[in-house]
Image: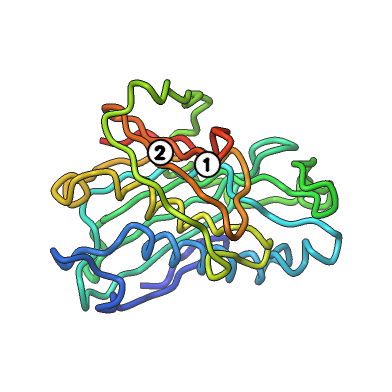
């Protein structure tokens, strides 16, 4: 069913076998890749996608991803993804996602927080004025925006940890590790049953990763974090 709101971008997908876990539910990273795809397609139609930004020596980077899961899509299931952008302030922009089944029943809701990266300095910068002055959908955010800070925990308290290595095939057009791979590493320290029963994931991306780096993923109760070889915190997360 087409959206009546011209600001709402909509796409349909059928979940592929390569995107599913042993229980036939979709991998979180596979779902995040679809969110990334529809976001890019919508941004392109609105003339502010990554290629438009790169022409200004800028790019979009994901700062935070908050996901509420009612049920993960299943293998061969047809799903509909609705997405729409919303401005936050001069530093942060939001993007909303709704994932529905073939009967328009809600499966997943997600709110992502985006910042603009200066490609020369590799630092966050203000959103260009030509975007902050634009009018987008006045539809409410799909999840309430939060300013809650997710704090790293002491590695000595970690209940479980795993080590991974980044490779060139993890890099995206911003020449750093794509955010979807962070999700794979973070969730790997959970048990298979915990991954299957996951109902909420909130991830804050703090620093960039590049190819050929060693990282450690740690878990403490409902908290997760990624550290690089120098023990700098790369990302933090909470789950339930």
Above or below for 198 versus 219: below
Foreground of the two, 229 or 42: 229
Above or below for 147 versus 211: above
Above or below for 223 versus 104: above
Q: Which mark is residue 64?
A: 1
Q: Residues within 10 Å of mark 1 (few under 14, many from 20)?
A: many
Q: Which mark is residue 202?
A: 2
Give the alpha-carbon distance from disc 2 to disc 1, as whole Å: 7 Å
The part of the image, by quadrant, that contains residue 12 is bottom left
Residue contact between numbered discs 2 and 1, judged by CB atoms under 8 Å: yes
Q: Which mark is residue 14?
A: none
| Image spot of residue 172 (x, y percent) | 61, 66
Q: Is residue 166 left or right of residue 23?
A: right
Label 1 element class: strand
2 or 1: tag closer to the N-terminus: 1
Above or below for 15 versus 95: below
Image quarter in which the C terminus is found: top left
Q: Residues within 10 Å of mark 2 (few under 14, many from 20)?
A: many
| Image spot of residue 168 (x, y percent) | 58, 68
| Image spot of residue 230 (x, y percent) | 58, 36
- Which residue lies at the image location 79% right of the left edge and 41% below the top edge? 125
Foreground of the two, 181 or 74: 181
Image quarter in which the N terminus is found: bottom left
Q: How is the image coloured?
A: rainbow
- Which residue lies at the image location 28% right of the left edge and 78% below the top edge? 16
| Image spot of residue 120 (x, y percent) | 85, 53
Q: Is residue 20 left or right of residue 233?
A: left
Q: Is residue 86 left or right of residue 124?
A: left
- Which residue lies at the image location 77% right of the left edge and 47% below the top edge? 122
Label 2 element class: strand
- Which residue lies at the image location 66% right of the left edge and 67% below the top edge? 173
């Amino acid at each position: 069913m087409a959206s009546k709101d011209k600001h709402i971008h909509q796409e349909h997908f059928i979940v592929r076998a390569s995107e599913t876990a042993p229980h036939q539910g979709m991998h979180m990273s596979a779902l995040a890749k679809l969110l990334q795809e529809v976001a890019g397609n919508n941004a392109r139609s609105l003339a502010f996608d990554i290629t438009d930004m790169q022409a200004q020596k800028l790019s979009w980077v994901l700062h935070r991803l908050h996901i509420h899961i009612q049920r993960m899509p299943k293998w061969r299931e047809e799903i509909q993804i609705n997405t729409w952008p919303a401005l936050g302030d001069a530093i942060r922009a939001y993007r909303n996602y709704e994932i529905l089944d073939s009967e328009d029943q809600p499966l997943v809701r997600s709110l992502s927080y985006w910042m603009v990266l200066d490609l020369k300095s590799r630092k966050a910068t203000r959103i260009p004025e030509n975007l902050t002055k634009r009018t987008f959908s006045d539809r409410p955010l799909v999840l309430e925006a939060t300013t809650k800070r997710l704090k790293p925990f002491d590695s000595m308290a970690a209940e479980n940890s795993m080590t991974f290595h980044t490779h060139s095939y993890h890099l995206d057009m911003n020449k750093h590790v794509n955010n979807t791979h962070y999700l794979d590493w973070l969730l790997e320290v959970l048990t298979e049953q915990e991954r299957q029963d996951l109902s909420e994931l909130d991830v804050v991306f703090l620093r960039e990763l590049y190819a050929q780096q060693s990282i450690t993923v740690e878990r403490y109760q409902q908290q997760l974090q990624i550290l690089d070889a120098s023990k700098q915190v790369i990302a933090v997360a909470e789950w339930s």
